[in-house]
Amino acid sequence: MTRMIIDTDTASDDAVALVLALTDADVDVLAITVVAGNVPLEMGVQNAIYTRDLCRSTAPVHAGADRPLLREQVLAHDVHGADGMGDIGLPLTGGEPAPDHAVDVLIELARRYPGEITLVTLGPLTNIALALRKAPDIAGLFDRVVMMAGTGDGTGNVTPAAEFNVYVDPEAADVVFRSGMPLEMVGWDVSRNDATLTAADGEALAALGPLGEFCNGIQRQLLEFCRTVTHLDGFDLPDPVTMAVALDPSVATRVVHVPVAVETTGSQTAGMTVCDHLGVTDRPANVKVVLAADRDRFLSMLHRACAR
Ligand code: RIB
Ligand code: CA
């Protein structure tokens, strides 16, 4: 049984990642911690509660940081819709989060289960950075930290250099990348190259039942964004492929252990994950960077989850 904490800025691709974990009988999701990112914090909390309930899970949902450490909030309604879930009319209100703050829950659970927890981060790293600042000892208490963050090839999706989760809060990402945690990074390049579903792939998921209908239906706005902005044939699923790597490391077919630093000051490059693939710096390798994933294995995991 894998003990897991999922930190999320719950929008349409995060929700599919939650479905993958919450429907896996071999995973005990100890907590879902929410951070502002794709959508404002409260919307992310409601979207997480709705998704959790749809999966008939009892995992507690805890609200966390409602803004980045220093910068103004950047949202992604253009990518995921006004409600973050494709604007398909889902009843995304009235959910009751668990009482404790996400940062305190991260610390308490890490200390309760030393060396046992896989932490999966799907949004800006604000909650994780705050937890590390409040309790530096937790850096050594996780078994794995699997992040949807940055890019392994330098191609950003918000600026030419920066991926959204790191772009929103580069200072938080810098704290995490310097922390010594057992970091695994699944960048947006993996999503673009190995986790893009065509509309037909999405329809095939929808045909599997209510969870498939949900996972496909909420991508409506993302499909439009990919058609007009990222020019992908379908929609890409960065958070779900990250969750797939967390659930089954063999999904990652190419991984390099290299030094990765986060740019926090560049006028053109703030939020860039600078991967030293050639070892030209004297920095120690601090991140296992996933550069490729097994698309077929990923798709079969999606089908298994959506058929439940
Ligand atoms: O850059 C991709 C990340 O930002 C994913 O976490 C997705 O949810 C988007 O918000
Ligand atoms: Ca996300």
Image (cartoon, rainbow, N blue to C red):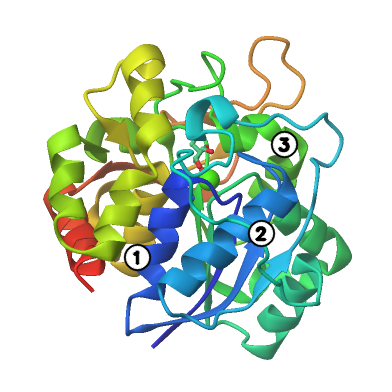
Residue 210: x and y in percent read: 27, 64
Label 1 to label 2: alpha-carbon separation:
18 Å
All told, the count of numbered labels is 3
Which residue is depicted at the point 58% across and 41% down? 83
Position of residue 119 relative to residue 166, above or below, is below
Tell me the quadrant of the picture where the N terminus can be found: bottom left
The mark that comes first in sequence, 2 or 3, is 2
Ligand 2 lies under 8 Å from the Cβ of mark 2: no
Q: Which residue is mark 2?
A: 45
In the depicted view, which residue is nearer to us: 204 or 300?
204
Q: Which residue is mark 1?
A: 20
Q: Secondary structure at mark 2?
A: helix
Label 1 to label 3: alpha-carbon separation:
26 Å
Q: Can residue 255 be seen in this snapshot?
A: no
Residue type at tag 3: Asp
Residue type at tag 2: Val
Q: Is 291 placed left or right of 285 in the picture? A: left
Mark 1 vs mark 3: in front: 1
Q: Which residue is mark 3?
A: 169
Q: Is 27 placed left or right of 195 in the picture? A: right
Do the residues bearing badges 2 and 3 touch, measured as CB atoms within 8 Å? Answer: no
Q: Secondary structure at mark 3?
A: loop
Tell me the quarter of the picture where residue 265 sits. Answer: top right
Label 2 to label 3: alpha-carbon separation:
19 Å
Position of residue 92 relative to residue 238, above or below, is below
Which residue is depicted at the point 53% across and 40% down? 259
